[in-house]
Structures are given as structure tokens and as C-alpha cells.
Image (cartoon, rainbow, N blue to C red):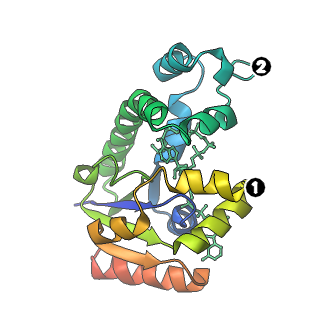
Amino acid sequence: MSLTVGLTGGIASGKSTVSSLLIEKGYTVIDADIEARLAVEKGEEAYQEIVRHFGERVLLKDGSIDRAELGSIIFHDEKERKALNSIVHPAVRKRMTAKKEQAISRNEQMIILDIPLLFESKLQYMCDKTLLVYADEGIQLQRLMQRNQLSEKEAMARIHSQMPLREKKALADAVIDNNGRIEETEKQLWDILRKWNAI
Ligand SMILES: CC(C)(COP(=O)(O)OP(=O)(O)OC[C@H]1O[C@@H](n2cnc3c(N)ncnc32)[C@H](O)[C@@H]1O)[C@@H](O)C(=O)NCCC(=O)NCCS
Ligand SMILES: Nc1ncnc2c1ncn2[C@@H]1O[C@H](COP(=O)(O)OP(=O)(O)OP(=O)(O)O)[C@@H](O)[C@H]1O
């Protein structure tokens, strides 16, 4: 029997940091951000729909999606964000489900689905347990500004386009506090997974 863990959090709360620890130990992590990138490559159905909806202003010279431009639209406009979500999310779900099935057929003990918008999109049905990576908003903001070289205004727009982390805390089966050092984060991760008999 495989256990599917839904790993979630807010933007820059530390999901990829936790994913890397799991990947290092050989676990399969299926990453929604990666699948979302693949789903909008030139020639994919979602690509055509994005161009139809947003126009050629969201294309780079080589015809690929201009992610910075698309981000600057959707993180400031809920209607446009919902439009993009409704184009991209079905394709992402389909890709993730296919990869999950492959991992199950390999009899893997634990499969991790890294899904930033797990609670916003009510995707709990895709996993057995949900694990939230949490950071206080001030720390999240600093890490996001630094990592993406964003102004405070841009970073806040991205944070506020998601369900507040404190609300997600109440929905998760377990929470990793990622306010401190990565070593402390890692200890919490393995403790939780051991408690769940996932490892
Ligand atoms: C807007 C886009 C082009 C910006 O691309 P960019 O390369 O700058 O960011 P990236 O894809 O790496 O996402 C970074 C983080 O932003 C947050 N985020 C991304 N999309 C959304 C969204 N629609 N709503 C809220 N937060 C989002 C997530 O926390 C994600 O981890 C891109 O994020 C996108 O296509 N988003 C729609 C698909 C989506 O919802 N992806 C999230 C997981 S399915
Ligand atoms: N405990 C920590 N201490 C210091 N820096 C950290 C810690 N955890 C994460 N970071 C840094 O914070 C930034 C955000 O972390 P990470 O990329 O793991 O977040 P994420 O939740 O995957 O973000 P996104 O949703 O945008 O993909 C990165 O630059 C990362 O190196």
C-alpha cells in the first residue's frame, strides 16, 4: 500500500526546500509547478487557450509563454487569475494523476504531491495526508522578495493571491514550522512521516 502525502504551503514558505530533502532520500515528488510549466509548452492545448484568452502580449519572441508578463497580470487581477487557473489546472491534475498512478504501480511506499494551491483548489481527495510548510508572513515576504527579486508590493500581491497560511494551518493534518533553520525543518519532516508510518 502506498501513502500519498499532499505537501503544501504558501508561496516561498519552503515547499521546494522540503521536497529537496525527500528527493535526496529517493522519494518520488510530483511537483505541480513543474507540471504547470510542461502543460503550457508550445503545442499543448493549454498554450493555445492562453494565447486565445490573453493575446500575444503574453508571448516571448520565440513564441513561448512570457511568465513574468503573465504573472504581472494574474497576481493583480482575480478575474484573470481564475481564467488562467481554469485553463491550466485541469491539465495539471491530469498529469499529476498519471504520474501518481505510475508510482503506485511501482509499489512505492510513499508518494509526495507538491501542490501550492492544494487547499484553494480543494484537492485533498488526491492524497491520504496533508502536510503544510508554514512560515510567518514577515519571513515569507522577506524570503520571497529575496528569491524572486520582487518589490514589497509585488511580493505582497503574490502572497495575497493565496489563502492565508494561518487558515491553511487549520486544514492540514500536520504542520512543519519553517521559520527557523533548515536542520529544524528537516527534523520535523522525518518525525511527522515516522508518526504516519510513511517511512
Ligand atoms: C503565473 C505564472 C505564469 C508565473 O510563473 P512563474 O515562473 O513566475 O512562477 P511559478 O510558476 O514558479 O510559481 C511560483 C509560485 O507562485 C504561486 N502561484 C502560481 N500560480 C498561482 C495562482 N494561479 N494563484 C496563486 N498562486 C500561484 C505558487 O505558490 C507557486 O509555487 C505561473 O505561476 C502559472 O502559470 N500559474 C498558473 C498555474 C498555477 O496555478 N500554478 C500553481 C500550481 S498548479
Ligand atoms: N528554513 C529556511 N531558512 C532560510 N531560508 C529558507 C528556509 N526555507 C526556505 N528558505 C529559502 O526561502 C525561499 C523560498 O523557499 P522555497 O523555494 O523552498 O519555497 P516554496 O514554498 O517552494 O516556494 P514556491 O511556492 O514559490 O515555489 C528560497 O530561497 C529558500 O532557499
Ligand 2 located in image quadrant: bottom right
Residue at point 56% right, 41% down? 76
Q: Nearer the viewer, residue 129 or 102?
A: 129
Residue at point 68% right, 37% down? 68
Residue 63 seen in render: yes
Residue at point 48% right, 60% down? 10
The answer for how far apart the CA atoms under marks 2 and 1 are is 23 Å
Percent x, y for residue 169?
34, 71
In the figure, 100 relative to 174: above or below? above
For badge 2, the amino acid type reads Lys
Residue 199 seen in render: no
Q: Nearer the viewer, residue 110 or 47?
A: 47
Percent x, y for residue 164?
42, 62
Looking at the image, is mark 2 or mark 1 nearer the viewer? 1
Label 1: which residue? 149
Is 68 left or right of 95, judged from the image as shown? right
Q: Secondary structure at mark 1?
A: loop
Task: Tell me the quarter of the picture where residue 85 sits.
Answer: top left
Disc nearer the start of the sequence (2/1): 2
The answer to whether the residue labelled 2 contacts the one labelled 1, judged by CB atoms less than 8 Å apart, is: no
Is 136 left or right of 163, judged from the image as shown? right
Q: Secondary structure at mark 2?
A: loop
Quadrant in which the N terminus is drawn: bottom left
Give the class, few, some or many, for how many residues have Cα within 10 Å of label 2's Cα (few <14, many ≥20): few
Q: Nearer the viewer, residue 163 or 109?
A: 163
Label 2: which residue? 61
Residue at point 54% right, 43% down? 34
Task: Tell me the quarter of the picture where residue 152 sits.
Answer: bottom right
For badge 1, the amino acid type reads Gln
Quadrant in which the C terminus is drawn: bottom left
